[in-house]
């Protein structure tokens, strides 16, 4: 078993086809097949089963892939840490951002990193806070921005980044929300579309309503930001989101945002990383620039939040 075989195995498992994997790797298909068979002989198990025109991982293959990802990730870390000893560190940083801030922050963050740390490659992933936490714990991300009302984990380290106000969201022509503000008690009487309890947004809404002795009236559970906005836009149902999630729809007049009062709904954003990972110079560079750009966006009122310095 060698490093090349492990890399080939991962490529085949992701492509679910030896032919596609060979094309991506720029090697001959028979040579790739020999490497996979040699790996299976070394392990004494079958890693793939044929299914139709493609192949799928066996149970042993699934377990092996998860372990190998961590091994290869650690090798990448070693390279990053060695390169960090130079004046201009290199390597790659993977960061996860909630949808609400991704549109505002990603372009600025990537541009600053390209200008100031050209040897550090960045990969930015959008996702729900719950997913970002899972990816951080499993080692698929170096850094992530997460909300407070999410799954807590003692393996994550966090730094506060900002607070973000959440609004009642509905169709632009909705007649039940003619005012610019609505109390949380009134919101509790409306049919809401929210994600399941696995996601912090749902937990946050329920915890805020508990303070007034109410529970949300859930019309539909939906695990998609796009879906939440589309249902609200059709009318008859409502959702709760930060402004960053719906700037385009607000500008186009497809949705409107009603401020929630008595009490308002605020959530805190944190930058998080795994305590099991070293806090490298690359990570510290990304963290510093992310905080600077966040503060600037808030000062310019581009992003309706408060900075936590």
Image (tube, rainbow, N blue to C red):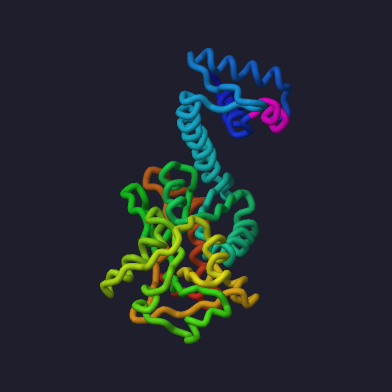
| Residue under the point 59% across and 61% down | 106
**Predominant secondary structure, magenta span:** helix
Left or right of residue 108: residue 95: left
Residue 293 visible in the displayed image: no
Rendered location of residue 296, percent (x, y): 54, 73
- Numbered disc total: 0
Q: Is residue 62 visible?
A: yes
Task: Determine the residue positioned at 51% across, 24% down.
Answer: 58
Q: Nearer the viewer, residue 287 or 49?
A: 49
x and y percentages locating residue 141 in the rendered image: 49, 47
Residue 273 magenta: no
Q: Against 291, is 38 above or below?
A: above
Q: Which residues are magenta?
A: 17-24
Is-magenta flag for residue 23?
Answer: yes
Q: Residue at x 57, y 28 (%)?
A: 56
Query: Residue 289: where, in percent of width, then height?
Result: 53, 62
Q: Is residue 80 above or below residue 124?
A: above
In which quadrant of the rendered view does residue 211 lie?
Answer: bottom left
State the residue in front, 181 or 298: 181
Q: Quadrant of the C terminus?
A: bottom left
Instruction: Name the residue at 53% across, 13% down.
Output: 41
Quadrant of the rendered structure where residue 183 is? bottom left
Eyeballing the image, is 56 above or below 80? above
Q: Is residue 64 left or right of residue 111?
A: left
Q: Position of residue 235 (x, y in %)?
A: 54, 72
Q: Nearer the viewer, residue 243 or 143?
A: 243
> Which residue is at the far bottom?
179
């Amino acid at each position: 078993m060698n490093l090349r075989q492990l890399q080939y195995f991962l490529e085949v498992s992701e492509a679910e086809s030896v032919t596609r994997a060979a094309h991506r790797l720029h090697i001959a298909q028979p040579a790739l097949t020999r490497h996979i068979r040699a790996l299976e002989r070394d392990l004494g198990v079958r890693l793939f089963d044929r299914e139709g025109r493609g192949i799928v991982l066996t149970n042993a293959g699934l377990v092996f892939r998860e372990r190998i990802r961590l091994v290869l990730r650690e090798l990448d870390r070693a390279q990053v840490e060695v390169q960090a000893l130079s004046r201009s560190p290199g390597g790659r940083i993977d960061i996860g951002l909630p949808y609400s801030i991704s549109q505002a922050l990603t372009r600025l963050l990537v541009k600053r990193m390209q200008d100031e740390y050209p040897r550090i490659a960045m990969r930015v992933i959008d996702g729900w806070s719950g997913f970002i936490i899972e990816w951080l714990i499993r080692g698929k991300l170096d850094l992530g921005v997460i909300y407070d009302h999410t799954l807590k984990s003692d393996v994550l380290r966090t730094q506060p980044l900002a607070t973000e106000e959440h609004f009642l969201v509905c169709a632009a022509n909705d007649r039940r929300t003619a005012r610019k503000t609505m109390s949380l008690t009134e919101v509790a009487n409306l049919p809401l579309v929210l994600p399941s309890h696995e996601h912090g947004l749902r937990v946050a809404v329920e915890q805020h309503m508990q303070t007034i002795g109410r529970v949300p009236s859930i019309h539909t559970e939906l695990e998609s930001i796009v879906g939440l906005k589309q249902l609200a836009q059709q009318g008859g149902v409502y959702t709760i989101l930060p402004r960053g999630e719906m700037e385009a729809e607000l500008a186009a007049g497809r949705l409107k945002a009603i401020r929630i009062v008595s009490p308002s709904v605020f959530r805190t954003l944190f930058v998080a990383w795994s305590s099991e990972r070293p806090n490298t110079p690359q990570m510290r560079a990304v963290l510093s620039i992310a905080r600077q750009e966040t503060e600037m966006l808030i000062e310019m009122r581009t992003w309706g939040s408060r900075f936590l310095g």
